[in-house]
Amino acid sequence: MRYVIAVLGLWSALMLTGCTPRIEVAAPKEPITINMNVKIEHEIHIKVDKDVENLLKSRSDLF
């Protein structure tokens, strides 16, 4: 009887260890490439008074 229990215990242990999942982490064979084709356009529109516009024209060294 003990022999049968020992054999069943050993058999169940072997069956359970055979069902363990295998996880493998590996680096990719090809390098990772990131394509960033970005086009940025912006426009700045400034409205100024005539007095400020004349000042900027006469004193171009301000900016």
Image (tube, grey):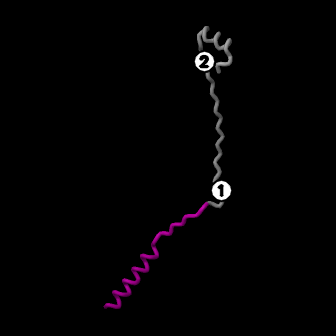
Q: Which residue is mark 2?
A: 46
Q: Nearer the viewer, residue 43 or 3?
A: 43
Q: Which residue: 55% across, 64% down?
A: 25
Three-letter amino acid code at the position of disc 2? Ile
Q: Nearer the viewer, residue 11 or 52?
A: 52
Location of residue 45 by image quarter: top right
Report x, y in % for residue 2.
32, 90
Q: Which residue is mark 1?
A: 31
Tell me the distance, in whole angstroms, between the alpha carbons under discs 2 and 1: 47 Å
Instruction: Tell me the magenta residue range.
Output: 1-27
Which residue reaches farthest top?
Answer: 50
- How busy is the neighbourhood of tag 1: few (under 14 within 10 Å), some, or many (20 plus)? few
- How busy is the neighbourhood of tag 2: few (under 14 within 10 Å), some, or many (20 plus)? few
Location of residue 9 by image quarter: bottom left
Report x, y in % for residue 31.
65, 56
What is the secondary structure assignment of the residue under circle 2? loop
Which dot, 2 or 1, sits closer to the camera? 2
Q: Nearer the viewer, residue 56 or 16?
A: 56
For residue 23, above or below residue 34? below
Three-letter amino acid code at the position of disc 1? Pro
Which residue reaches farthest left?
Answer: 1
**Of the residues under marks 2 and 1, which one precedes in the sequence?**
1
Report x, y in % for residue 21.
47, 69
The quadrant of the rendering that contains the C terminus is top right
Location of residue 56 by image quarter: top right
